[in-house]
């Protein structure tokens, strides 16, 4: 793990405001980075006053760790797997009843019926490989890491499912297979405005809080 002092310059009328923050870059992706990501997210919430943290968490356990660490400083939204798992004979829902009770008692919103934004719903199990715009977007995000792609995706899923208002700064967290290794400050949108002519309706990645340097 390495530390980087990130300088962000924002222009406001005639003055320039410089924001300096500490970002984390991990030497390898994976769940071993989860605790570092949690601490970094708590610190960024305290610095910015951001009110929502969206966490990709299949089992709900990682989202619960974030909720316990944040202690009500921000609302946690847990994005778990959707019923499409059942088409491959996988169990759904996959959040253990005890974990679900803990999430609910911690006021964590659980999303487990939203379509994965970067999966082409009609082409995912196509007999022949098909290159769609959705697939291209997904592969481009993979160049920044699986956790990065997931963090962007769950932010959009939270909006499209009606659990999060768009066009506000939120923190979104993703990981590589398990746990968390990426955290971003994102301005989420409705997916339909991804390529809008109006730039204020487009997705924005405003800050990188943590991410792995090596991608898998």
Image: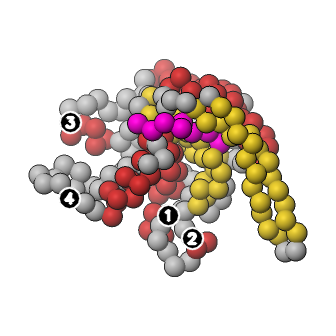
Q: Which residue is denoted by mark 4 in the rendering?
A: 130
Bounds of the magenta span? Answer: 209-216
First reached walking from the N terminus: tag 2 or tag 3: 3
Compared to residue 190, the image places residue 154 above or below, namely above
Residue 201 - label? 2
In the image, is residue 212 part of the stretch drawn in magenta? yes
Return the x and y of residue 123 as percentages of the image width and height. Answer: 22, 56
First reached walking from the N terminus: tag 4 or tag 1: 4
Q: Which residue is denoted by mark 3 in the rendering?
A: 88
Query: SS at mark 3?
Result: helix
Compared to residue 74, the image places residue 36 above or below, namely above
First reached walking from the N terminus: tag 1 or tag 3: 3
Q: Which residue is denoted by mark 1 in the rendering?
A: 190
Point 56% across, 58% down: residue:
188
First reached walking from the N terminus: tag 1 or tag 2: 1
Marks 1 and 2 close (CB-CB < 8 Å):
yes
Query: SS at mark 4?
Result: loop
Return the x and y of residue 109 as percentages of the image width and height. Answer: 55, 40
Point 45% across, 63% down: residue:
191
């Amino acid at each position: 793990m390495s530390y980087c002092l990130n300088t962000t310059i924002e222009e406001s009328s005639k003055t320039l405001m410089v924001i300096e923050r500490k970002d984390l870059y991990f030497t390898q992706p994976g769940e071993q980075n989860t605790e570092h990501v949690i601490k970094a997210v708590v610190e960024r919430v305290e610095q910015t006053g951001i009110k929502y943290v969206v966490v990709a968490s299949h089992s709900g356990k990682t989202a619960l760790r974030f909720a316990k660490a944040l202690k009500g400083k921000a609302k946690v939204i847990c994005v778990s797997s959707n019923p499409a798992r059942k088409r491959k004979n996988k169990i759904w829902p996959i959040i253990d009843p005890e974990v679900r009770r803990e999430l609910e008692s911690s006021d964590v919103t659980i999303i487990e019926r939203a379509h994965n934004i970067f999966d082409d719903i009609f082409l995912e199990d196509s007999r022949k490989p098909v290159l769609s715009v959705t697939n291209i977007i997904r592969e481009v995000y993979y160049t920044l890491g699986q956790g990065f792609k997931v963090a962007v995706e769950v932010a959009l899923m939270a909006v499209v499912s009606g659990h999060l208002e768009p066009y506000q700064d939120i923190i979104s967290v993703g990981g590589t297979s398990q746990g968390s290794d990426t955290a971003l400050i994102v301005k989420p949108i409705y997916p339909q405005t991804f390529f809008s002519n109006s730039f204020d309706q487009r997705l924005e990645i405003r800050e990188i809080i943590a991410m792995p340097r090596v991608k898998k």
